[in-house]
Image: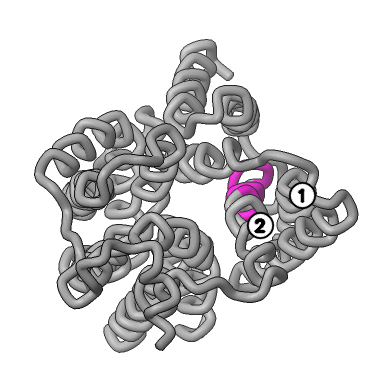
Amino acid sequence: MVEMLDDTAGPPAGRSRGTGPSRKGVLAGFWAALPMLIAVIPFGLIFGAVAREAGLDVLETMAFTVIVVAGAAQLVALQMLDEHAPVIVAVLAGAAVNLRMAMYSAAIAPHWRGASTAFRVVGAYFLHDQSFGLTAQRHARDPDEPLADRLGFFLGVGTLTVSFWMGSSLVGAVLGARLPEGWGLGFAVPVCFLAIAAPMIRGAGHLAAAVTGVLVALAASGLPWNLGVMLAAVAGITAGVVVERRTGG
Amino acid sequence: MSDFAVWGMIIALGVLTYLIRFSFVGLLRGRELPPLVMSALRYVPTAILPALVAPMVVLDRAGGWGSARDMAAAAVVILAGAVTRSALWAIVAGFGSWHLLRLAGV
């Protein structure tokens, strides 16, 4: 019943098969994702090194990277366990960081109308900041791209960035603390997070969300288990929604 | 930390994260949630990402001020990201300025 709702916009072939990715699209995705590796590789190295420093072995570090595939959340959860927060607090904090992916999922769903269930199951694994960002840009520029090429593009970006993310995590985990400090790897985490967020700050709502979040996070930084960040997120989101309603979007 | 804690965290966070990603593309198949929820989701990244890094950059572990180089380079990332609307240029500008400041002895 419910599936019929969005089938109206899909291909008449029906959902039972659905469309999969095209080879041409995958290659275009690889190409588009190449510059992203400048950010992905240092981030992976950092995660690997930080995880080892926190006491994980190489197997645990790689399981973390392969199962969760979300650098920011992994670092947050790790930092919390390191501060002896209960496991449930670390998990919830990491999941909160990943809530942004629900928004990506909602935004990308209309572009996947007519995609096969197999593609949805596999594609969801590769949904992260880079694959979403590049795909959203491409949809905006070329809304009429055939579905198979569009799905291929997503998968190309996703598989390339995720495999380099895993590879660089492995290198970071093996080399550990031997990575030279002069490379500025410690600064890679703030750079990546800010570089993802800054282009999204459009309009008063986003500005209010970011400024409120930062101020609350700084004021509450003394709280245990990074609870200040949770508080900051709630305050920032509330500020964004309130300002959006006041200014009419 | 114990092995149990580590593996419990990895698996729980992995399952939750996959469900978050699969939510709209798989479970809901593109159906929309109430406008208030969608609006709140829209502000998650801009609220949480800068809030996560602000204490790392502005404060040090003891609660004093952080490094001037980090703060200046972080400001460059935000500025470059806002102007170019590109995460890549923001990263290049941020790392570039961080290394320039390092060479300048800041």
- Quadrant of the rendering where the N terminus of chain A is positioned: bottom left
Residue at horizontal 35 percent and vertical 40 percent from the top: A144
Q: Is residue A239 magenta?
A: no
Task: Give the residue furthest to the top.
Answer: B104
Residue A134 against residue B102 in the figure, above or below: below
Q: What amino acid type should be assigned to the residue bearing mark 1?
A: Gly
Q: Quick one: label 2, few (<14), some, or many (20+) residues within 10 Å? A: many
Residue B38 located left or right of residue A160 = right
At label 1, counting other C-alpha atoms closer than 10 Å, the crowd grade (few under 14, some 14-19, many 20 or more) is many
Q: Chain of mark 2?
A: B
Q: Are marks 1 and 2 in contact (CB under 8 Å)?
A: yes
Q: Residue at x 33, y 75 (%)?
A: B14
Which contiguous range is marked in magenta?
A: B50-59
Chain at numbered mark 1: A
Res. A220 image quadrant = bottom right
**Which mark, by number, is residue A173?**
none
Residue A10 horizontal side relative to residue A88, left or right:
left
Q: Is residue B41 above or below residue B7?
A: above
Q: Main secondary structure of the magenta part?
A: helix
The local secondary structure at tag 2 comes to loop
Query: In percent of the image, x 84 and y 61: which residue is there?
Result: A242
Q: Amino acid at mark 2?
A: Tyr
Quadrant of res A112? bottom left
Who is closer to the viewer here, A195 or A15?
A: A15
Where does the image place residue B36, in percent across and percent down from the top left? 72, 70
Q: Let me know if residue A98 appears in the view.
A: no
Identify the residue position indicated by label 1 in the image.
A205
SS label for mark 1 = helix
Position in image of residue B104 (x %, y %): 53, 11
Residue marked by disc 2 = B43
